[in-house]
Image: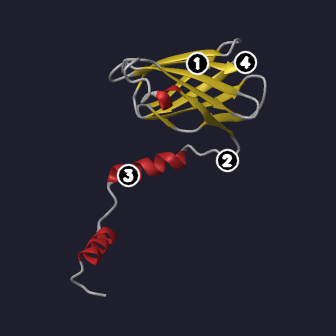
Amino acid sequence: MDDDDPLWTLLRRATRDPVPDHVLEAARASLSGRDPDSALAALVADSQADADRLVFVRGDDQARLLTFSADDLTFEVEISPGGRAVGLIGQLVPPTSARLAIDHPGGVAEVTADALGRFQASGLTPGPMRLRCTRDDRAGIVRMDWFLV
């Protein structure tokens, strides 16, 4: 091993440098919201996946449509761009009334879904986001994967 090797110098420096505060905060936040007893609804459709093909057909101000699915519940979500804040409109399938918590960089927004499963929120801070759903008709929480807005 050559002590003058630039790669070894970089590796030594990287292991001595402290982890930035914002990285530690993000790591703590990702672990603080863990709930091992909740069901996970995985992303099954994202309109942004086709954005590269449709860039000349659709403008940048189009709503983003996401679908998340768990064993017995599907979230259909529309994210509307709004600059410094975004809006969210959604539907639970099958329709059910529920309480939802929307985790976003600005905090946690709490909304309710009506008997038809419809819900909405506005003024959400762009960044990593997820929804947690507690249905009125059964125990347990269904939560989404994190997604980036």
Distance from Cα at disc 3 to Cα at disc 4: 38 Å
Asked whether the residues under the numbered discs 3 and 4 touch, taking CB atoms below 8 Å apart as contact, a structural biologist would say no
- Label 4 vs label 1, nearer the camera: 1
The residue carrying mark 2 is 36
The residue carrying mark 3 is 23
Distance from Cα at disc 3 to Cα at disc 2: 23 Å
Few, some or many residues within 10 Å of mark 3 (<14, 14–19, 20+): few
- Label 1 vs label 2, nearer the camera: 1
Residue found at x 37% / y 52%: 23
As displayed, is residue 86 above or below residue 26?
A: above
Distance from Cα at disc 3 to Cα at disc 1: 31 Å
Residue found at x 41% / y 31%: 106
Residue 99 location (% of width, % of height): 64, 23
Does label 3 or label 2 sit earlier along the sequence?
Answer: 3
Type of residue at label 1? Gly
Distance from Cα at disc 4 to Cα at disc 1: 12 Å
Few, some or many residues within 10 Å of mark 1 (<14, 14–19, 20+): some
Question: Dot 3 lies on which element?
Answer: helix
Distance from Cα at disc 4 to Cα at disc 2: 23 Å
Residue 93 location (% of width, % of height): 70, 21
Direction from residue 22 to residue 147 in the image, left or right: right
Residue 13 location (% of width, % of height): 27, 71
Q: Check residue 96 in the rendering and tell me which mark sits there, or answer none.
A: 4
Type of residue at label 2? Pro
Distance from Cα at disc 1 to Cα at disc 2: 25 Å
Question: Dot 1 lies on which element?
Answer: strand
Q: How is the image coloured?
A: secondary structure
Does label 4 or label 2 sit earlier along the sequence?
Answer: 2
The residue carrying mark 1 is 90
